[in-house]
Image: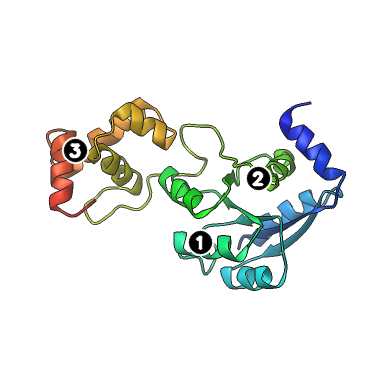
Amino acid sequence: MNAIDAIGTSLSENQALRIVIADDHKLLADAVASTLKGGDAFDVESCYDLDSLLKTLAQETFDVVMLDLRMPGMAGLESVGQVVKAARDGYVVLFTGQVDRHVLDKALLLGVRGLIPKTLPLRSLGSIIELISSGQIFVPVGADFPGSGAGAESEHGLHEKELFVLRLAADGKTNKEIAREMGSTEVIIKMHMRAICKKLGARNRAHAAIISRERALL
């Protein structure tokens, strides 16, 4: 029996974990709730916007809050912080199909306990929620998170992920260090750096850092 299965067995012998799924995709939220309700391990509720979630958290306590970043009312990390505070002793985990690594890193600093991608097989969900409820942080292994992308371009033509790479490079980090911090590979980081230099008209990464500071990109 592995560690996750052991946690699941132990928790299932006790009272059901209280879960709230906060997602405006009602069909998905209801499907996940239905799956989790299949046994006696979980007591599940659903909310479809930030306001209803905050009201629910003010009235009830939950062990785990599964939070979609893009449901109505959400305003990025500020709203994530609100939910973490409202959850009190409950654990908040991002439940999303689109998130960049640096956004996740900032969310973790706010107290979020990790990321559950919407592409995760439903059969794995129960064990992961039990792992999170035990106080562990769960982040899927991989170079890129499912559904993540370059994101919208800034006024200077750089995507969010490129801006993050540029910030780390300007701080003096090597491609290897940047790759480790982003959960990516050196090859991918080199590709980002080439794109950054091309968009900024920079000769190299050092020149790109100088240009970015002159243009107040960082």
Judging by the rendered image, the residue that carries numbered circle 1 is 81
Q: How many tags in the picture? A: 3
Asked which secondary structure carries label 1, the reply is helix
Q: Residue at x 18, y 47 (%)?
A: 212
Q: Residues within 10 Å of mark 2 (few under 14, many from 20)?
A: few
Q: Earlier in the sequence, mark 1 or mark 2?
A: 1
Question: Residue 197: which numbered mark, if any?
Answer: 3
Q: Residues within 10 Å of mark 1 (few under 14, many from 20)?
A: some
Find the distance from the CA under tag 1 to the CA under tag 2.
18 Å
Q: Position of residue 160 (x, y in %)?
A: 34, 49
Q: Nearer the viewer, mark 3 or mark 2?
A: 2
Q: Position of residue 126 (x, y in %)?
A: 74, 43
Of residue 30 and residue 100, the one placed in the foreground of this image is 100
Asked which secondary structure carries label 2, the reply is loop
Query: Quadrant location of residue 49?
Result: bottom right
* Horizontal relation, residue 119 to residue 105: left or right: right
Asked which secondary structure carries label 3, the reply is helix
Judging by the rendered image, the residue that carries numbered circle 2 is 135
